């Protein structure tokens, strides 16, 4: 028999493997590109400038963020959706989640993306907040990184986190017009997501989970989409990303 | 701009300090030199992308989680490695002084474990984190982690220390 220290010793001194210096220049270059695609604007430190404009009777917030822009239409709307027309870097309607934070209501919107390395990706999904003056602040941008952003199934679902001490919900989108219900198992308990159909493409179903029910650090399994007959749809079983 | 450069310098320092350990962990997880280098590099790419958020917290733990997530992705691929009950024969007349022989056998036996068993062993005994943390980072139940760990150690012919011995040696977390 071996003892545990033998095993630890073997793992820490692998006789047939010696680590080599990694190409950190490549890490910085690839990481920088990934950062631009998955950008976190964390509160005031993100240097987000908000300029509210009035266009066509609707209040439009345009965000400057590291050279990129984002805008939206803010209005009082029905639960989950705000009636609005495309403006700036917001494609379609801004989706209200009903989740209130001290920094404003958390909202979701679709943002156009263009990257030579991602020929099948034309948009990403932003989780952000609507501030008291009606502007938008982006917190998390997710997007597909392999293949088409409209391929049937889940695309880069993001797990719940805390941004500046504020819980952010697990969220993402499912491509497939049949999706009538989306659920996840959180610490062994099945939780149903709230959903909204993207105004520009009814096959894109945006979903989010209440952070009070699906908290940061919760073990999430069995992310699943069902049709209106409660039949499991393709792509179910996807896992959430971290950061 | 200056702040960004300082942040990059911190990341490079972090990466240099930890890349060897990450590569070794990745080698233990994949059993392949090239995959290990690629996995460690891929993990650092993701960490750098989130560096502004994680640098003031526990970037090493975050990197470990990212590496674990990369592994989880591999579990989901159709082409996967399956567990085998046939492990390398342990030298019958093992020379206790021959540490290299023993290490080589253990690493060979580790490679023969199922991916999930191997992952639990590496997370628990290489990274030395608690079973609760292993469960959270690998997205497994605690019971599954305990079961996989116990089964893997049995296959590795590793005797499980008694609680008394463990507490004395600080192995229980």
Image (tube, coloured by chain):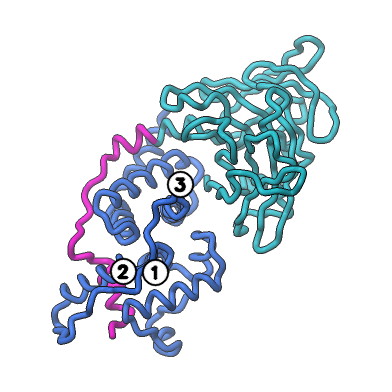
Residue depicted at x 39% and y 88%: B165
Chain of residue at mark 2: B
| Residue for point 35% across, 32% down | A29
What residue is at 18 percent from the left and 62 percent from the top?
A16
Residue A131 locus on image (x, y percent): 73, 31
According to the picture, the residue beneath numbered tag 3 turns out to be B55
Q: Is residue B154 above or below residue B27?
A: below
Q: Which residues are magenta?
A: A1-30
Q: Residues within 10 Å of mark 2 (few under 14, many from 20)?
A: many
Q: Specify the quadrant of the image occupied by residue A104.
A: top right
**Mark 1 residue element:** helix
Query: At 68% from the left edge and 25% from the top edge, which residue is drawn?
Result: A201
Sequence-wise, the earlier of marks 1 and 2 is 2
Colour for chain A in the figure: cyan
Q: CA distance from mark 1 to mark 3?
A: 27 Å
Q: Position of residue B91 (x, y in %)?
A: 18, 81
Is there any visible trace of residue A212 in the rendered image? yes
- Indicate the chain on which mark 1 is placed: B
Chain letter behind tag 3: B
**Classed neighbour count for the residue bearing mark 1: other residues with Cα under 10 Å, few (<14), some (14–19), many (≥20):** many
Image disc number at residue B110: 2
Q: Which chain is blue?
A: B
Is any atom of residue A130 visible in this view?
Answer: no
Residue corresponding to mark 1: B121
């Amino acid at each position: 028999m071996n003892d545990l220290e033998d095993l630890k010793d073997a793992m820490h001194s692998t006789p047939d493997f010696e680590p080599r210096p990694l190409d950190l220049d490549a890490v910085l270059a690839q990481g920088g590109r990934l950062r631009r695609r998955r950008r976190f604007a964390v509160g005031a430190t993100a240097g987000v400038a908000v300029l509210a404009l009035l266009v066509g009777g609707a209040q439009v917030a345009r965000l400057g963020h590291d050279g990129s822009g984002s805008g939206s239409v803010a209005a009082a709307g029905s639960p989950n959706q705000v009636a609005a027309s495309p403006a700036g870097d917001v494609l379609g309607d801004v989706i209200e989640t009903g989740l209130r934070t001290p920094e404003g209501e958390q909202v979701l919107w679709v943002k156009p993306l263009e990257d030579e390395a991602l020929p099948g990706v034309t948009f990403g999904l932003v989780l952000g907040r609507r501030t008291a003056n009606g502007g938008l602040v982006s917190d998390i941008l997710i997007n597909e990184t392999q293949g088409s952003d409209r391929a049937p199934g889940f695309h880069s679902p993001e797990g719940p986190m805390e941004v500046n001490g504020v819980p952010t919900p697990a969220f993402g989108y499912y491509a497939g017009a049949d999706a009538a219900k989306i659920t996840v198992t959180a610490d062994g308990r099945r939780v149903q997501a709230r959903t909204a159909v993207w105004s520009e493409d009814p096959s894109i179903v945006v979903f989010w989970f209440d952070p009070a029910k699906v908290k940061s650090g919760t073990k999430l399994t069995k992310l699943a989409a069902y049709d209106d007959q409660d039949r499991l749809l393709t792509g179910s079983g996807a896992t959430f990303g971290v950061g | 701009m200056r702040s960004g450069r300082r942040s990059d310098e911190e990341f490079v320092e972090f990466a240099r300090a930890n890349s060897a350990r990450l590569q070794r962990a990745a080698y233990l997880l994949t059993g392949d030199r090239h995959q290990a280098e690629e996995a460690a590099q891929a993990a650092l790419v993701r960490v750098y992308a989130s560096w502004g958020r994680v640098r003031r917290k526990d970037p090493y733990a975050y990197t470990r989680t990212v590496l674990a997530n990369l592994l989880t992705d591999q579990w989901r691929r159709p082409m996967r490695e399956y567990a085998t009950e046939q492990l390398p024969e342990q030298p019958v007349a093992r020379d206790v002084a021959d540490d290299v022989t023993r290490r080589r056998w253990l690493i060979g036996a580790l490679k023969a474990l199922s991916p999930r068993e191997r992952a639990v062993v590496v997370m628990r005994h290489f990274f030395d984190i608690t079973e609760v943390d292993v469960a959270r980072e690998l997205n497994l139940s605690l019971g599954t982690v305990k079961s996989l760990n116990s089964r893997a150690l049995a296959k590795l012919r590793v005797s499980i220390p008694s609680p008394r011995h463990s507490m004395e040696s600080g192995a229980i977390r």
